[in-house]
């Protein structure tokens, strides 16, 4: 039961999807105008591929181009608005007229791949404007003339009428026949049916006789009236019934002036003021999109109306309300406007017979260059560019932009310092406001002694929709601010040094760079062991770990944190204006710091010193109360006053050496085990306050050595990276020397006074 229901529902859905007659869809509007009926379809909502069929009691008729020309239909696609319009004449082939009520029935067919959905549309219109005796419609694709079927006989008989009478007399048929005249030439008469085969339509409604013809038929001709080309078709219908001959003259004349675009920004179109000899125009009105305005009103909207030499010239402002605009890419951004121009001319002849001429013309401007607005809204104090790109038409989108060669997609993501904001205006344009900071951005900086110039080259990539045609728009902006701020070095850490770098710029000459109070010169660099280079681009120097000037702290079993600072001073006043401080963590195996305030900080590797079953935590200095501050399986960190914890003092030639040892409590020192001595050596000169009451300090840090007595067969000391850092100048350095323990006690250390921190390691079997 359930399955049966399901199947029948499925069947119903399949049938529904592939067959016809959905209700009037959204996006379809139907309007009765005074002289035509219009269906407007939004392709977004209904479908891209749509077509129309005219419907009457006998069936449906596909409206092809040819059929439209013949039967009184006009189709127009407005690409910019994604809109298709069908205009139908009140006298179109399949219109049903009952008592001045006109019923239009159409099928709107939307093709979607295999599917075809048909929407039945119908509407009855009753135009309120009475029909004139003669009505002429110059549609875009056909000319149509209708006359009231009972007309009072005109007063004068023209020569041509006698010719027609002769024609009528020569034919015995009572059927209606037609003859065309081409200027002076008269074509032989044909039957109405034959004329139909040639694309002409003659029709008789309840009270009007209608004649319709496409443009460019063999019987039509172009004449130039007052300088304006006019296409004319002159048909005469006649019928002889015994002694009575009926003649109806049907003349359609339409201006086929090709609208031109004037440099002043007008689309200009011309028509003769008097289209038919003997008539004079009494009324003129015109507008766009099916609207008619009196000339006085049109003038207030910027239209130009001029009459000269019996010619009416109308100038439509290029961006008039009701125009359709389209962006086009052709090496740059262009635009084209198109207009659905509509005009009515009322005229009367000497008999007071009124002729109403309605003209539809589709006009299009050539490609006009469209300029976008580049605006510099930068406020220097904000330290960023504010750039506005405006007057972007609705059918153009910004896709990406390059800022000094660096590409950014729109919308911006993840670039917090930059911003791009879209601004939409009521006049169907939009713009983008772009903010790019002067610093830390792709902005180019150029320096002079007193100023910094910021340069921003922008290359916008925009795209015209819906065709998705891209084009580029370029702009350049510059801002200048005084260069007053002291420079900052770029600093970076590496395993065993800190690198400082400063790009040269002219204003740097106002500043002096110092380490402490010493100016940074090649001499200072070489004496302190900095690797300094100064090329045309930048000043760079690398400060090796343990060089003078470091501030070291946070000692731990892993190493310590080294901090180095460079001052920027005003060259004239020597005042410190700013500084660059960089702290880096350094991992190290061993080190010994002999500070000016007479403290030792020792990180020692006790791998070889521990006796089996013991741990570094249980090792002490000579004073067994002095244990390590931190320790692990192999290392211990001691911090203690120079002259405490059992340290001994030895005087050398001009030096004072403090020594202590790391050992086990209670245990006899084994000959096999490594013995570890810690030595700090100060020049005597720097210890002038050694015996002063105020304190115990040194002018310079001491030189430290960690001496391991354990041997290595090769005998050469194994040194670790920080210690073996190449020094730019030769200096006594124990770490590179091989010291016998026996010599050690009397060794006169001649170490330079510069090293604040020394980590030394000597290995030697006890002899
Ligand atoms: C529109 O649909 C018709 C009928 O299915 C098909 O012949 C035609 O190729 C389609 N046109 C486009 C542009 O898809
Ligand atoms: C249908 O066709 C017949 C025969 O051609 C014609 O007489 C009749 O007027 C047509 N009906 C409509 C509504 O056009
Ligand atoms: C027009 O359409 C409506 C509803 O779709 C329908 O009720 C009406 O009968 C139709 N009229 C004609 C003349 O087709
Ligand atoms: C009379 O009419 C018939 C049919 O329309 C046509 O074939 C014939 O040429 C006409 N005769 C003259 C003299 O125009
Ligand atoms: C009007 O016609 C006269 C004479 O034919 C001619 O000289 C004049 O240039 C015309 N004026 C315009 C605006 O075309
Ligand atoms: C933003 O950045 C984060 C981390 O850098 C990344 O994971 C994410 O994908 C980015 N988002 C976009 C939209 O680029
Ligand atoms: C559109 O409006 C904006 C804001 O009022 C204005 O700045 C801009 O010039 C206008 N653009 C055009 C093309 O009229
Ligand atoms: C501008 O950007 C586009 C797309 O990124 C690129 O193809 C074009 O070469 C650029 N033009 C210039 C002058 O940089
Ligand atoms: C942009 O505006 C700033 C601030 O008003 C000004 O200093 C600068 O000269 C301008 N740059 C350009 C290229 O117009
Ligand atoms: C580096 O060289 C520049 C010239 O290239 C010079 O002006 C500057 O004083 C030098 N700096 C140092 C610290 O030697
Ligand atoms: C400690 O010294 C031993 C023996 O010289 C060595 O094997 C070990 O790698 C050192 N420990 C560290 C952390 O360097
Ligand atoms: C270290 O010393 C403590 C107390 O002096 C003792 O209890 C401990 O066993 C010793 N540790 C080792 C591994 O010898």
Image (tube, rainbow, N blue to C red):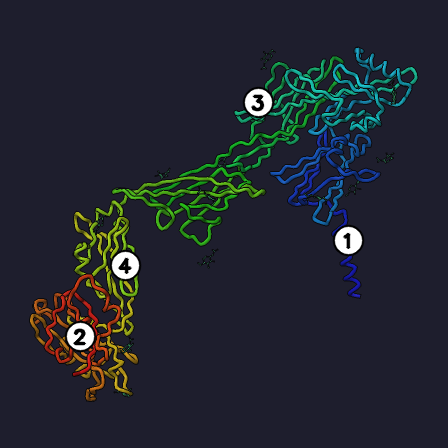
Q: How far apart are labels 4 and 1 at the CA level?
A: 78 Å
Q: Quadrant of residue 166?
A: top right
Tell me if mark 1 has few (under 14), some (14-19) or many (20+) residues whose alpha carbon lies within 10 angstroms of its own. few
Do the residues bearing badges 2 and 4 touch, measured as CB atoms within 8 Å?
A: no
Relative vertical location of residue 424 with respect to residue 37 in this rendering, above or below: below
Is 540 or 460 nearer to us in this picture?
540
- Number of numbered callouts drawn: 4
Q: Which mark is residue 304?
A: 3
Tell me if mark 3 has few (under 14), some (14-19) or many (20+) residues whose alpha carbon lies within 10 angstroms of its own. some
- What secondary structure is found at the residue carrying circle 3? strand
Q: How far apart are labels 2 and 4 at the CA level?
A: 32 Å
- What secondary structure is found at the residue carrying circle 2? loop
What residue is shown at x 27% (from left), y 46% (from top)?
A: 505
Residue tagged by mark 1? 15
Residue tagged by mark 2? 738
Confirm whether residue 745 shows in the render: yes
- What secondary structure is found at the residue carrying circle 1? helix
Do the residues bearing badges 4 and 1 touch, measured as CB atoms within 8 Å?
A: no
Q: Earlier in the sequence, mark 4 or mark 3?
A: 3
What residue is shown at x 61% (from left), y 25% (from top)?
A: 259
Check the picture and name the quadrant holding the C terminus.
Answer: bottom left
Label 2 vs label 4, nearer the camera: 2
Do the residues bearing badges 2 and 1 touch, measured as CB atoms within 8 Å?
A: no
Q: Is residue 366 left or right of residue 758?
A: right
What residue is shown at x 78% (from left), y 62% (from top)?
A: 5
Q: Is residue 373 left or right of residue 4?
A: left
Confirm whether residue 517 shows in the render: no
Label 4 vs label 1, nearer the camera: 4
Label 1 vs label 3, nearer the camera: 1
Provide residue 404's location: percent of width, then percent of height: 40, 45
Q: How far apart are labels 3 and 2 at the CA level?
A: 107 Å
Residue tagged by mark 4? 499
């Amino acid at each position: 039961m359930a399955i049966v229901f399901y199947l029948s529902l499925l069947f119903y859905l399949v049938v529904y999807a592939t067959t016809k007659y959905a209700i009037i869809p959204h996006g379809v509007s139907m309007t009765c105008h005074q002289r035509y009926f219009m269906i407007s379809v939004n392709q977004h909502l209904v479908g891209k591929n749509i077509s129309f069929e005219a419907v009457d009691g006998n069936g449906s008729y596909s409206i092809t181009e040819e059929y439209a020309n013949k039967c009184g239909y006009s189709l127009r696609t407005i690409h910019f608005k994604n809109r298709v319009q069908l205009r139908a004449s009140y006298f179109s082939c399949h219109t049903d007229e009952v008592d001045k009520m006109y019923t239009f029935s159409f099928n709107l067919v939307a093709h979607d791949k295999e599917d075809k959905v048909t929407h039945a549309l119908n509407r009855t219109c009753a135009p309120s404007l009475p029909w004139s005796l003669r009505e002429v419609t110059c549609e875009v694709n056909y000319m149509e003339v209708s006359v009231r079927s009972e007309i009072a006989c005109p007063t004068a008989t023209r020569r041509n009428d006698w010719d027609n009478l002769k024609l009528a007399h020569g034919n015995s048929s009572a059927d209606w026949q037609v003859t065309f005249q081409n200027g002076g030439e008269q074509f032989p008469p044909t039957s109405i049916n034959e004329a139909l085969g040639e694309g002409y339509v003659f029709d008789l409604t309840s009270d009007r006789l209608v004649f319709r013809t496409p443009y460019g038929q063999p019987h039509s001709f172009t004449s130039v009236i007052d300088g304006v080309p006019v296409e004319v078709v002159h048909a005469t219908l006649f019928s002889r019934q015994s002694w009575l001959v009926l003649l109806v003259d049907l003349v359609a004349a339409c201006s086929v002036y090709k609208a031109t675009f004037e440099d002043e920004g007008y689309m200009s179109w011309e028509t003769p003021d008097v289209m038919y000899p003997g008539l004079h125009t009494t009324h003129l009105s015109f507008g766009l999109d099916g609207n008619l305005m009196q000339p006085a009103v049109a003038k207030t909207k910027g239209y130009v109306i001029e009459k000269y030499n019996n010619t009416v010239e109308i100038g439509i402002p290029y961006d008039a309300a009701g125009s359709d605009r389209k962006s086009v890419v052709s090496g740059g951004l262009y635009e084209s406007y198109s207009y659905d121009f509509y005009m009515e001319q009322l005229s009367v002849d000497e008999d007071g017979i009124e002729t109403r001429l309605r003209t539809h013309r589709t006009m299009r401007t050539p490609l006009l260059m469209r300029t976008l607005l580049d605006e510099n809204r930068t406020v220097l104090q904000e330290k960023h560019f504010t750039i506005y790109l405006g007057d972007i038409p609705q059918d153009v989108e910004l896709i990406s932009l390059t800022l000094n060669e660096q590409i950014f997609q729109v919308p911006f993501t993840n670039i917090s310092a930059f911003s791009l904001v879209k601004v939409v205006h009521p006049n169907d344009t939009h713009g983008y406001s772009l903010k790019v900071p002067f610093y830390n951005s792709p902005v180019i900086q150029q320096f002079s002694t007193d100023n910094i110039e910021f340069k921003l080259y922008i290359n916008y990539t925009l795209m015209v929709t819906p065709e998705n045609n891209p084009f580029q728009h370029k702009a350049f902006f510059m801002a200048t601010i005084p260069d007053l701020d002291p420079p900052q070095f770029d600093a970076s850490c590496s395993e065993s040094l800190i690198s400082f770098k400063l790009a040269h710029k002219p204003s740097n000459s106002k500043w002096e760079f110092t380490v402490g109070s010493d100016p940074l010169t090649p001499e200072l660099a070489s004496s302190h062991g900095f690797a300094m280079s100064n090329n045309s681009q930048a000043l760079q120097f690398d400060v090796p770990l343990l060089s003078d000037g470091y501030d070291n702290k946070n000692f731990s079993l892993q190493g310590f944190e080294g901090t180095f600072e460079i001052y920027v001073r005003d060259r004239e006043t020597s005042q410190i204006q700013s500084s660059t401080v960089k702290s880096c963590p350094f991992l190290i195996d061993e080190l010994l710091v002999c500070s000016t305030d007479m403290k030792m900080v020792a990180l020692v590797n006790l791998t070889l010193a521990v006796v089996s079953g013991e741990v570094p935590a249980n090792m002490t200095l000579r004073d067994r109360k002095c244990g390590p501050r931190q320790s692990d399986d192999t290392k211990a960190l001691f911090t203690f006053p120079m002259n405490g914890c059992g340290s001994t003092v030895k005087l050398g030639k001009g030096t004072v050496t403090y020594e202590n040892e790391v050992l086990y409590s209670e245990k006899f020192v084994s000959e096999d085990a490594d013995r570890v001595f810690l030595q700090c050596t100060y020049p005597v000169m720097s210890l002038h306050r050694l015996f002063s009451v105020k304190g115990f300090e040194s002018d310079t840090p001491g030189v430290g050595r960690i001496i391991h007595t354990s041997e290595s067969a090769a005998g050469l000391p194994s040194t670790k990276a920080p210690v073996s850092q190449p020094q730019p100048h030769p200096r006594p350095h124990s770490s590179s020397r091989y010291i016998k323990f026996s010599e050690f006690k009397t060794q006169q250390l001649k170490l330079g006074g510069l090293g604040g921190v020394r980590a030394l390691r000597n290995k030697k079997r006890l002899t």
